[in-house]
C-alpha cells in the first residue's frame, strides 16, 4: 500500500498512528503548497483534493484520517489504539469525534480563514469574518477537555488511543499558526508534554 503524504497535521496524525503500531508506510510526497493536490493526477486518487490518502494493493483508496487509522489498526496484530472491546472502541470513537467537531475543526477553520487565508482563499470558500469567533469557540471547549484530563490519563481513558494522537497532532500544529493552548489548562499541558515525548511524535 502507498501513503500519499504532505505537510500539515492530517498526514502527521496518520504517520504518528502508524509509528505507534510499528507499521511502515510507503510514502509518496504531495506538494500541497504548490497545489499538486489539486492537479488531475492526485484528483484521480482523491477527488476531494485532500491529503492524506492510502492506496491499498488492490487499488482501493481510503481517505480521511480516522478511516485510515482504523484500517491500520484492524490489519495490525498487536495492541489496538481503538480499543479491545466494544465499549472501549465506542469511547475512543466518541472522544475522537468530539475533538474533531468541537475543537479541531474550529481551530483549523480559524486558521484557514485567518492566518492561512492567502493559501486557502482560492481553494475553498473562506469566511475571514468568522476566524476570531471560531478560535474563541475552540478555546471555550478546552474547558471540557481540561476536566476530562484531570480525571483520566488519556483522552478516551487510561491508555493512549486514536483520540490522543488526533488531539496531539492538531494541537501541535495549531500552536505554529497563531493559536495556543489555554494558559491555565494544567492537565492539557501535562498530557501534551507526555504525548510530545513519545517516539512516534517525531514521525
Image (tube, grey):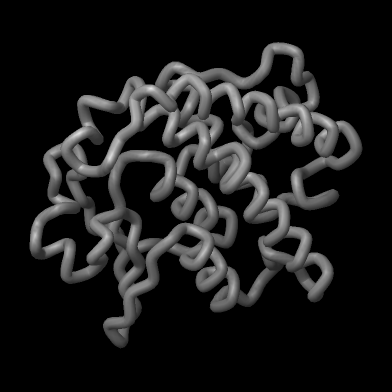
Is 181 on the left-hand or right-hand side of 131? right
What is the residue that sits farthest to the right in this orientation?
151
Where residue 31 sits: x, y (%)?
18, 45
Q: Write down the quadrant of residue 79 in the picture.
A: bottom right
Residue ranking furthest to the left: 40
Number of labels in the image equals 0
Note whether 132 is above or below 202 in the view shown: above
* Residue 9 rendering spot, x and y as whole percentages: 43, 41
| Residue in the image at 75% along x and 25% along y | 190
Instruction: List the single residue furthest toward the bottom.
Output: 58
Residue placed at 57% from the left, 47% from the top? 100
Which quadrant: the N terminus? bottom left
Q: Residue at x 72, y 58 (%)?
A: 94
User: Residue placed farthest to the top in the image?
Assistant: 183
Residue 161 percent location from the top left of the image: 69, 54
Q: In the rendered image, which quarter contains the C terminus?
A: top left
User: Does residue 57 sit above or below 44 in this rendering?
Assistant: below
The quarter holding residue 144 reads: top right
- Lateral position of residue 30 relative to residue 110, left or right: left
Give residue 45's position: percent from left, percent from top.
Answer: 22, 69
Horizontal arrangement in the rendering, residue 72 relative to residue 185 (left or right): left
* Rendered image quadrant of residue 102: top right
Q: Residue at x 39, y 50 (%)?
A: 11
In the image, 15 versus 189, the foreground residue is: 189
Amino acid at each position: 500500500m502507498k501513503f500519499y503524504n504532505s505537510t500539515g497535521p492530517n498526514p502527521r496524525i496518520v504517520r504518528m498512528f502508524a509509528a505507534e503500531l510499528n507499521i511502515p508506510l510507503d510514502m509518496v510526497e504531495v506538494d500541497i503548497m504548490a497545489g499538486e493536490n489539486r492537479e488531475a493526477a492526485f484528483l484521480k486518487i482523491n477527488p476531494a483534493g485532500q491529503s492524506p490518502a492510502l492506496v491499498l494493493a488492490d487499488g482501493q483508496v481510503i481517505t480521511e484520517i480516522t478511516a485510515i487509522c482504523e484500517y491500520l489498526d484492524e490489519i495490525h496484530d498487536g495492541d489496538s489504539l481503538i480499543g479491545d472491546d466494544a465499549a472501549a472502541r465506542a469511547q475512543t470513537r466518541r472522544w475522537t469525534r468530539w475533538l474533531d467537531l468541537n475543537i479541531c475543526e474550529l481551530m483549523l477553520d480559524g486558521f484557514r480563514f485567518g492566518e492561512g487565508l492567502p493559501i486557502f482563499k482560492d481553494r475553498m470558500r473562506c469566511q475571514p469574518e468568522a476566524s476570531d469567533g471560531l478560535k474563541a469557540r475552540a478555546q471555550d471547549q478546552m474547558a471540557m477537555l481540561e476536566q476530562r484530563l484531570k480525571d483520566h490519563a488519556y483522552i478516551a481513558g487510561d491508555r493512549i488511543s486514536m483520540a490522543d494522537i488526533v488531539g496531539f497532532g492538531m494541537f501541535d500544529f495549531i500552536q505554529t499558526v497563531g493559536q495556543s493552548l489555554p494558559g491555565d489548562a494544567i492537565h492539557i499541558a501535562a498530557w501534551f508534554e507526555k504525548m510530545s515525548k513519545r517516539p512516534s511524535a517525531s514521525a
